[in-house]
Image: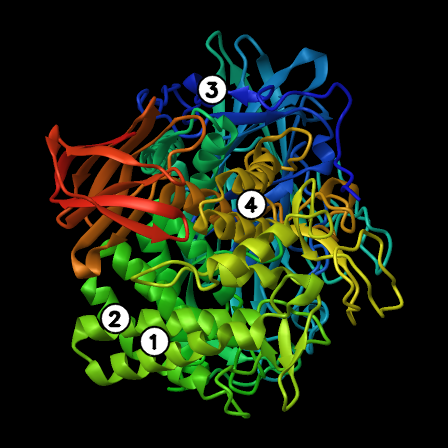
């Protein structure tokens, strides 16, 4: 049964809502006194073109981020109560580790302004607001990186006269933890806010010691203001613009203005803004701090010093993001555009917090004294609004997308943060924490928790990934000892001594066996990656141990894990002393094909098994119109029954779950690409790309969500703001950037060993290209094409490495000639999982390889 996909009346085409690269009306955005034009992004290298939406704006969330503050609201310019971790409080303005505002609202001449058009840009958003008497106001929201303030610019049109501008703000100063359902809960620790006016700005404070043992005293502050002097002000808890004071109950009402744990208050500023013949821009800032009022004032002043310059700097930074890993995909322009937006999504996801008091909450049941303090944490946030904090598994998958985008620093920071947090709560064990909020609360992943084994064994692989793409031996050395301890710890979780570690993997569902498929797969890869790093350091003992451990598991893998029969798949887990195979149709069944092992390379699953398993998972019992289901359909003993088709006769103990996660599509896209199955891969890359770029599917234009429209989930737009999945989730980018840069263009750095391999697989369209792909401190351009019987690959590599240059040749192809830069050269033909690769070696610089087929 195909999933129901939402379509609005009119059937808008994918390209219908594109606004080319400049901010709407930005020529007038400037400080309050005279307007200054903002320089556009370099014309030759624009950031991702803006994407606009005009329908159901009140039902759509948006996110604007900087590294130290982010904003979540509705695309009509309101701020409904949002999210579930702290019920109704996950939206608004946050400067980790605290929330500071529920929202900010603007009115003109006695009427509240609402947006009729929302546009997502690269690092900022704009809204076209409408007011009384045909007044139109353009709004831009941006959060400068490194600061704890957001900027909102309002552009009034020429000859608007004197406008009575009203600004409401409603505070909510609270911590990222506790949550609504933990012990203690947020309601027990959240103190009432106070509001005041300092002659120019609204000032909100939350000071004191909550009446709960173990919760420290705090001094939190938020300010809202402008460079203008208000004509008047008001204070009171009911000041929330056009919104009311409906509190979110449990379970109802679900359309509400404030969470049940809210203790905020409100304020209002009014201005008389005179607008001349050239129009006028007024800037506002929202600033906050968890270190008292003085730092918050400093943040506000810094933001308002040159707001137009801050916007220009943000746009320039995002243009720099866009410059790297640019691709030309004539046969798949949708995927090409998704590459551009996915790079921006990753840049949106970088977060930072300071002074983390690190403690283990035992899954929200305890609040002990901190085990230590981490001065600074920087990470790739998992998803907004409910998962913007630190996750190991999300970051480990996202790392593959980030290196393909050239965003090396973000991955390095994420890994160091995971290491530092893990060392504080887990001592020298090497176990990696699972989930940590930006105040330092470790929800899961301590030594007392039975699991997250997969995140521990993936850690050395991601360290090795970054090392290979950057050649940064200092980074390798910094995380090497922890990587060794991680693999020693994980391989020790083997009570039955069968080689397969026990503990939780990626599927967080009951009824699985003690040993999970994904844990087994990533353990093999982690051991081989550790062995490679050990060899490079001359650590022969560790290299030999890791290599031998991996080899033993590889020899036993197929006979242990292949379920066989008409399941045509690997088992999801093993249980009992006899390692009984359990087959439950989870998405992790694709991981043996997705995980790529280090040199000599290739995925773990042999081609025969892989073809069988992938073909099975492409069927309608596993894949629907939006992609790869979390749990496939088929016979089940679960009382819920089976709502979909059956592709095998195995009776599972668990229900199907026809929910499509963007990560699941990424896993299948990468798995297909590992075996050169580009037509099959396209089904999954297209699904993720459409979630960003199809107006019939997106919630926020350009943002890849956590969950796509699915039969058993519905869509985010079909749900209330308290129950939705993430509107922006980083991990899905793995299924866009890695397939294009690494698999289709064939870019595979191993700079730790002084090598760079570029072996494209030319698609059916006959041409593919990429430029400014970062590797180490250099970069490379790649272009591959087929013209008749000639396959041509041109590489310009400004990378100090020995270059292996080649191409995947068609099955059964006979080679007439191979030339490099016009000269005949010997070439090596190697059969790989992708197909036959024909390669030769050379050095850095510009080179053209031509393979002529008979």
| Label 4 SS | strand
Question: Is 448 situated left or right of 344 in this image?
Answer: right
Mark pair 4, 2: CA separation: 40 Å
Q: Position of residue 26 (x, y in %)?
A: 45, 21
Q: Quadrant of residue 180?
A: bottom right
- For the point 72% across and 24% down, the residue is 110
The residue under label 4 is 71
Q: Quadrant of the C terminus?
A: top left
The residue under label 3 is 20
Q: Eyeballing the image, is 523 above or below 628?
A: below
Q: Eyeballing the image, is 656 above or below 159?
A: below
Front of the two marks 4 and 2: 2
Front of the two marks 4 and 1: 1
| Cβ atoms at labels 2 and 3 below 8 Å apart | no
The residue under label 2 is 533
Badge 1, how many Cα within 10 Å: few under 14, some, many 20+? many
Q: How many marks?
A: 4
- Answer whether residue 97 is visible to the viewer in this image: no
Front of the two marks 1 and 3: 1
């Amino acid at each position: 049964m195909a999933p129901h996909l939402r379509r609005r009346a009119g059937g808008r085409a994918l390209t219908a809502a594109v606004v080319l690269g400049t901010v709407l009306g930005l020529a007038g955005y400037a400080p309050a006194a005279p307007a200054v034009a903002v320089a556009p992004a370099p014309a030759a290298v624009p950031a991702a073109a803006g994407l606009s939406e005009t329908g159901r704006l009140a039902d759509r969330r948006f996110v604007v981020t900087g590294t130290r503050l982010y904003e979540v609201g509705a695309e009509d310019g309101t701020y409904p109560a949002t999210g579930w971790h702290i019920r109704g409080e996950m939206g608004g303005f946050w400067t980790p580790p605290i929330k500071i505002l529920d929202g900010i609202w603007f009115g003109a001449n006695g009427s509240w302004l609402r947006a009729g058009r929302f546009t997502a840009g690269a690092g900022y958003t704009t809204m076209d607001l409408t007011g009384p008497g045909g007044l139109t106001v353009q709004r831009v929201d941006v959060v400068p990186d490194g600061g704890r303030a957001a900027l909102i610019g309002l552009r009034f049109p020429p000859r608007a006269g004197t406008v009575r501008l009203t600004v409401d703000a409603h505070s909510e100063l609270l911590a990222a933890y506790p949550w609504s359902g933990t012990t203690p809960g947020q309601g027990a620790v959240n103190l009432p806010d106070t509001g005041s006016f300092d002659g120019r700005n609204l000032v909100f404070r939350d000071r004191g010691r909550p009446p709960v043992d173990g919760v420290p005293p705090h001094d939190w502050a938020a300010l809202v203001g402008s460079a203008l002097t208000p004509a008047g002000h008001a204070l009171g808890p009911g000041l929330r613009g056009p919104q009311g004071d409906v509190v979110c109950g449990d379970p109802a009402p679900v359309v509400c203005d404030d969470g049940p744990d809210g203790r905020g208050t409100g304020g209002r500023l009014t201005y008389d803004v005179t607008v001349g013949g050239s129009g006028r821009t007024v800037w506002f800032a929202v600033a906050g701090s968890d270190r008292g009022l003085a730092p918050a004032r400093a943040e506000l002043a810094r933001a308002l010093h040159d707001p137009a310059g801050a916007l220009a700097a943000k746009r320039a930074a995002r243009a720099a993001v866009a410059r790297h890993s640019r691709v030309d995909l004539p046969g798949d322009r949708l995927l090409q555009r998704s590459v551009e937006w996915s790079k921006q999504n990753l840049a949106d996801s970088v977060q930072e917090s300071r002074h983390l008091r690190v403690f283990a909450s035992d899954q929200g049941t305890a609040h002990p004294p901190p085990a230590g303090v981490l001065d600074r944490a920087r990470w790739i946030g998992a998803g907004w609004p409910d998962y913007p904090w630190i996750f190991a598994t999300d970051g480990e998958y996202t790392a593959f997308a980030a290196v393909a985008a050239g965003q090396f620093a973000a991955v390095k920071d994420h890994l160091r943060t995971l290491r530092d947090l893990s060392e504080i709560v887990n001592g020298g064990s090497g176990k990696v924490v699972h989930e940590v909020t930006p105040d330092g609360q470790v929800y899961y992943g301590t030594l007392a928790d039975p699991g997250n084994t997969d995140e521990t064994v993936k850690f050395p692989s991601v360290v090795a990934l970054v090392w290979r793409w950057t050649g940064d031996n200092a980074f390798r050395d910094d995380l090497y000892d922890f990587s060794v301890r991680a693999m020693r710890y994980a391989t020790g979780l083997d009570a039955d001594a069968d080689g397969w570690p026990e503990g939780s993997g990626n599927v967080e569902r009951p009824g699985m066996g003690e040993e999970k498929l994904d844990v087994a797969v990533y353990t093999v890869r982690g051991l081989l990656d550790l062995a490679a790093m050990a060899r490079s350091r001359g650590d022969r003992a560790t290299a030999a141990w890791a290599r031998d451990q991996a080899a033993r598991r590889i020899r036993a893998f197929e006979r242990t894990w292949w379920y066989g029969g008409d399941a045509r798949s690997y088992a999801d887990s093993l249980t009992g002393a006899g390692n009984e195979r359990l087959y439950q149709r989870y998405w992790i069944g694709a991981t043996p094909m997705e995980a790529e092992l280090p040199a000599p390379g290739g995925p773990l699953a042999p081609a025969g098994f892989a073809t069988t398993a992938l073909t099975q998972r492409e069927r309608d019992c596993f894949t629907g119109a939006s992609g790869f289901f979390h749990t496939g359909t088929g016979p089940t003993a679960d009382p819920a029954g089976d709502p979909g088709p059956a592709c095998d006769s195995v009776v599972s103990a668990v229900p199907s779950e026809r929910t499509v996660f963007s990560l699941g599509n990424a896993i299948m896209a990468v798995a297909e690409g590992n075996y050169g199955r580009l037509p099959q891969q396209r089904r999954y890359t297209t699904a993720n790309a459409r979630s960003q770029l199809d107006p019939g599917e997106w919630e926020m234009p350009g943002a890849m969500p956590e969950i796509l429209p699915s039969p058993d989930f519905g869509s985010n737009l079909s749900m209330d703001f308290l129950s939705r999945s993430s509107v922006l989730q980083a991990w899905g980018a793995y299924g866009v950037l890695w397939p294009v840069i690494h698999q289709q263009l064939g870019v595979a750095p191993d700079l730790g060993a002084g090598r760079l391999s570029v072996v494209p697989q030319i698609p059916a369209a006959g041409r593919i290209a990429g430029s400014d792909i970062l590797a180490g401190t250099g970069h490379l351009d790649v272009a591959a094409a087929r013209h008749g019987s000639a396959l041509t690959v041109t590489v310009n590599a400004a990378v100090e490495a020995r270059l292996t240059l080649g191409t995947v040749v068609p099955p059964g192809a006979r080679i007439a000639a191979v030339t490099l830069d016009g000269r005949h050269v010997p070439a090596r033909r190697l059969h790989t999982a992708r197909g036959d690769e024909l390669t030769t070696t050379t050095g850095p610089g510009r080179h053209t390889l031509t393979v002529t087929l008979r």
